[in-house]
Image: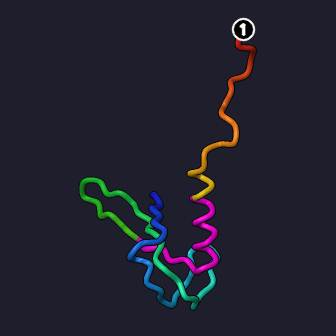
């Protein structure tokens, strides 16, 4: 199984439903991705849409920004260069 997240964009039409992160129900949520299981020969692929509330969408956006940010210092291997 894999999770595909897409934040922002045209598919963020608000709806009422459960948030997959905080698991609260009947909130204003937006589609943020899907949980997928790849199929093999003779098997069905499964795609489950994932919805998140505004607070959790903000948390996901911050996590994405942190993941894409370059490190503060470049990696330097242990040992002396001489």
> In the rendered image of this protein, does residue 49 appear above or below residue 36?
below
Asked if the stretch drawn in magenta spans residue 14, the answer is: no
Q: Is mark 1 on a helix, strand or loop?
A: loop
Farthest residue in the left direction? 42
Query: Going 42% across and 72% down the picture, which residue do you hit?
Result: 9
Examine the image and state in which quarter residue 54 appears: bottom right
The residue where tag 1 is placed is 82
11 over 44 or under it: above or below: below
Give the x, y percent position of residue 75: 66, 31
Q: Where is residue 68 in the image (x, y as percent from the top left)?
A: 56, 51
Residue lying at 74% horizontally and 17% vertically, measured from the top left:
79
Q: Where does the magenta region start and end?
A: 48-64
Determine the main secondary structure of the stretch shown in magenta: helix
Q: Is residue 54 magenta?
A: yes
Q: Quadrant of the C terminus?
A: top right
Q: Is residue 3 left or right of residue 69?
A: left
Check the picture and name the quadrant holding the N terminus: bottom left
The image quadrant that residue 63 belongs to is bottom right
Residue at (47% x, 86% y) in the render = 14
- Residue 12 spot, x, y in % from top left: 44, 78
Comparing 70 with 31, the one in front is 70
């Amino acid at each position: 199984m894999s999770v595909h997240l897409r934040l922002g964009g045209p598919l963020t039409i608000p709806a009422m439903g459960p948030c997959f992160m905080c698991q609260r129900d009947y909130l204003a949520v937006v589609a943020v991705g899907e949980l997928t299981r790849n199929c093999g020969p003779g098997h069905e692929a499964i795609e489950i849409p994932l919805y998140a509330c505004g607070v959790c969408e903000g948390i996901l956006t911050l996590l994405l920004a942190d993941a894409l940010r370059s490190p503060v210092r470049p990696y330097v291997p242990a040992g002396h260069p001489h």
